[in-house]
Image: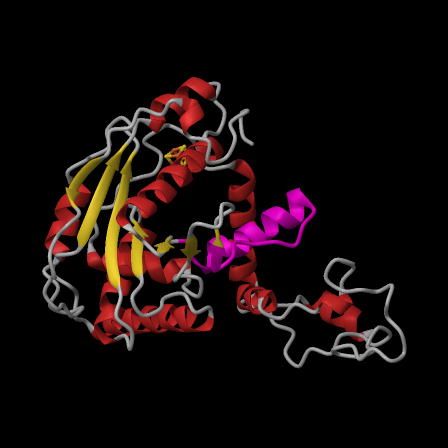
Amino acid sequence: MAGGVPIYDIGALSVRCNTRIIADSQPEFAVHTFSDLPTPHAVPRSSTFLRLKKKLERSVGEAIADFNMIEDGDTVMVCVSGGKDSFSLLSILLALRERAPVDFRIVAMNLDQKQPGFPDDVLPAHFAALGVEYRIVTEDTYAIVKDKIPAGKTSCSLCSRLRRGIIYRTASEIGATKIALGHHRDDMIETLFLNLFFGGRIKSMPPKLVSDDGQHVVIRPLAYCVEKDLARFARAMAYPIIPCNLCGSQENAQRRQIKHMLNAWADAHPGRIESIFTAMKNVVPSHLLDEKLFDFKKLTKEVAVAEGDVAFDPPDFDDPVGAPQAVISMVRGH
Ligand code: SF4
């Protein structure tokens, strides 16, 4: 619930619905390669850019494979907000599709929330130039958010919930089997710390999830991509970026705080952020305190436990990534 609004209960809010299908039944489109896509802007060809492109495509390919995100016959609805991450996601997926061992359809989707100043011609022109199927959905969630959230308060929470409901409905309408979002590695790490610091939970953003109603599979193919790389890529591609603060809302203060903390760590202790992300893939439930994940009550001598008994040993880090000297001394006991 947010502001008394149930998640997904869009109907109860009388959202004005004026779905506009710009191009939803485009026949077979031509085979594109990344380099010859008819993008509105010339694709850079410097070796630095090509290395960056390769790195991002490799990261996305790995995430797709690791979490079985896309399968043969899928229709992937790529949500494009007009920000650097979703623009990049669409380009990378289009490139990967050309050499993927599976056949899948991509439909770009944008939700025009009627924010003042939203340039509603930019994304249709971009999608058309790419030659990708797309759908633009126009719904005035801006008016609802303004109505429900007092001035000066952050509206992102309600806005996102409304958006989610519309995205799910649109995915059903176009027969999408996967919904791809542009969240990346750094979004996931920030969310982990937000939950840790403010929510009392060890929880992040999943790379793949099923919606509460069991109807939709959401994927985050940028899960292994670093935000700075995406920003460089987007700059080089000269995407027509549309800011996400046309509504006047400010980024959540707690998220800003976490972002600053992580950036400061990254500057002062190279490798620390990478170590945190690696840790998210290496959870040891028997060495935490969550009885839902590990049945301590039934633990007996006969039960084998991963990593065994190292409770009395100081953690042994070959390379204590980014650990300040005081911490290294402390864990090594000297
Ligand atoms: S910044 Fe504005 S448009 Fe973006 S999520 Fe927040 S309320 Fe919605």
Colour basis: secondary structure
Question: Which residue corresponds to the image point at 87% horizontal and 74% vertical from the top-left?
Answer: 312
User: In the visual, does 114 lie left or right of 248?
Assistant: left
x, y (%) of residue 119? 19, 35
Question: Which residue corresponds to the image point at 26% horizontal and 66% vertical from the top-left?
Answer: 104
Q: In the depicted view, which residue is nearer to us: 118 or 101?
A: 101
- The range drawn in magenta is 183-209
x, y (%) of residue 59? 39, 70
User: In the visual, does 169 lie left or right of 67?
Assistant: left
Residue placed furthest toward the right: 301
Question: Which residue corresponds to the image point at 54% horizontal and 69% vertical from the top-left?
Answer: 271
Residue 185 is covered by the magenta coloring: yes
From what the image shows, is residue 252 above or below residue 308? above
Name the image quarter holding residue 249: top left
From what the image shows, is residue 50 above or below residue 236? below
Residue 82 is covered by the magenta coloring: no
Q: Can residue 299 be seen in this view?
A: yes
User: In the visual, does 5 lie left or right of 320?
Assistant: left
Image-quarter location of ligand 1: top left
User: In the visual, does 170 lie left or right of 201?
Assistant: left
Quadrant of the frame with the C terminus: bottom right
